[in-house]
């Protein structure tokens, strides 16, 4: 079965986009077929994966492509019954280069597809109405666009093991929509003063999202008792969290690498918030079991600060596990310490991929 996973935190700058890109590469290396959906109006995932120029071409609206070749081509016609929804997938630039330049084989199996985002998603978010569409149950399907898109692709013989959704840093209707569609959500956090507060806020807001959905679901089911889709949605499970962007030091006496003191302080604070605030609130959701047994307060992955390499990933349109084979743009060669950091973090992303495969 295809698993839909949202990367979500209402706080910005926590590494959602970088995590989605790098995680997709690790999952693909393990033979999994991946779809990336850019559901963030900032469209950073689209730019990072397919390139700035290529993304601009996908945004272009023409007579042949009246809504471009982005997620808009599927979402906007769904709001206009006279229009036909279209799906357009592309591939990460590095994957295309690998196929054409290394194997010279366009027909090599594609493991990662991308649904490009669109700045229009800001307007789409305004069209989605919680009170009428969700709570009253009259427009629940309008909040299932990512899921319906995946189902449409299945009809076109494009079936994925995992769908990763990149989201804006907010609690807006786009985030609601993705969570209602998702089987699991992962929460990236960074070592700063606001991360534990935002984790606590997720525990306060998510139950209300689920309550709204279930009110609408009950109303909808009174006249649509044979619908099998709506009852199965609105049940996102917490798949764990990712500690992102911290610094480490190696202790001379033990040769052990650990977080620096200030970052360890923030890690401990987030751990406490997970155990004593978020977890009890998720367990309190009455409609389904939101907190699976495999999830603990410890992070599912610990990704150190990538420094300039995060910018290189964006500029070169290459995930971390292929980065060292490309020439950097900001300096002449990768240093020994940078290569070592790339190696360690590749292992961490691979471990996160295994965590997902084994548990989700």
Image: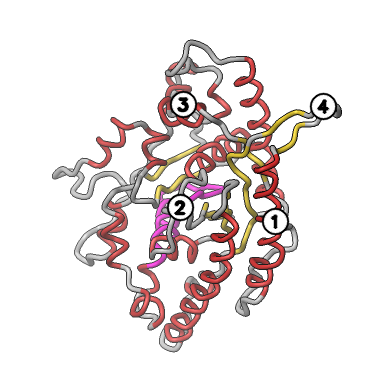
- Residue under label 4, please give it: 255
Which of labels 3 and 1 is toward the front?
1
Secondary element at tag 2? helix
Residue at x 69%, y 43% (from the top left corner): 354
- Residue under label 2, please give it: 154
Q: Let me know if residue 144 is in the magenta part.
A: yes
- Residue under label 1, please give it: 271
- What sort of colour scheme is used for the picture? secondary structure
Secondary element at tag 1? helix
CA separation in Å, label 3 and label 2: 34 Å
Reply above or below: 60 against 134: above
Pointer 4 or 1: first along the chain: 4
Q: Is residue 355 left or right of residue 74?
A: right
CA separation in Å, label 2 and label 1: 39 Å
The residue nearer to you, when weighing 337 against 161, is 337
The answer to whether residue 143 is visible is: yes
Q: Are marks 4 and 2 in contact (CB under 8 Å)?
A: no
Residue lying furthest bottom in this view? 222
């Amino acid at each position: 079965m295809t698993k839909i996973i949202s990367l979500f935190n209402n706080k910005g700058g926590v590494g959602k986009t970088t995590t989605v890109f790098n995680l997709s590469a690790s999952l693909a290396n393990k033979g999994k077929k991946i779809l990336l959906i850019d559901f963030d109006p900032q469209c950073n995932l689209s730019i990072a994966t397919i390139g700035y120029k290529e993304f601009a071409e996908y945004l272009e609206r023409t007579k042949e492509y009246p809504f471009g070749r982005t997620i808009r081509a599927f979402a906007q016609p769904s709001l206009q019954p006279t229009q036909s929804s279209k799906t357009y997938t592309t591939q990460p630039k590095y994957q295309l280069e690998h196929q054409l330049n290394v194997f010279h084989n366009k027909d090599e199996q594609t493991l990662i597809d991308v649904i490009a985002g669109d700045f229009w998603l800001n307007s789409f978010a305004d069209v989605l109405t919680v009170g009428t569409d969700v709570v009253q149950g009259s427009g629940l399907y309008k909040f299932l666009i990512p899921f319906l898109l995946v189902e449409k692709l299945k009809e076109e013989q494009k079936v994925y093991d995992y769908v990763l959704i990149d989201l804006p840093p907010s609690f807006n209707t786009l985030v609601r929509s993705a969570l209602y569609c998702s089987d699991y959500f992962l929460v990236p956090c960074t070592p700063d003063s606001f991360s534990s507060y935002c984790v606590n806020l997720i525990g306060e807001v998510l139950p209300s999202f689920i309550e709204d959905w279930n009110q609408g679901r009950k109303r909808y089911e009174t006249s649509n008792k044979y619908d099998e889709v709506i009852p199965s949605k609105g049940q996102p499970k917490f798949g764990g969290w990712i500690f992102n962007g911290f610094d480490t030091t190696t202790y001379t006496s033990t040769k052990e690498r650990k977080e620096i003191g200030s970052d360890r302080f923030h890690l401990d604070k987030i751990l406490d918030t997970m155990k004593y605030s978020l977890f009890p609130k998720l367990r309190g959701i009455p409609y389904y079991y939101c907190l699976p047994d495999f999830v603990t307060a410890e992070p599912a992955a610990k990704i150190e600060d990538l420094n300039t390499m995060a910018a290189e990933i964006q500029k070169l349109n290459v995930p971390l596990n292929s980065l060292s084979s490309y020439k950097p743009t900001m300096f002449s060669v990768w240093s020994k310490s940078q290569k070592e950091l790339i190696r360690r973090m590749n292992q961490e992303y691979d471990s996160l991929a295994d965590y997902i495969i084994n548990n989700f």
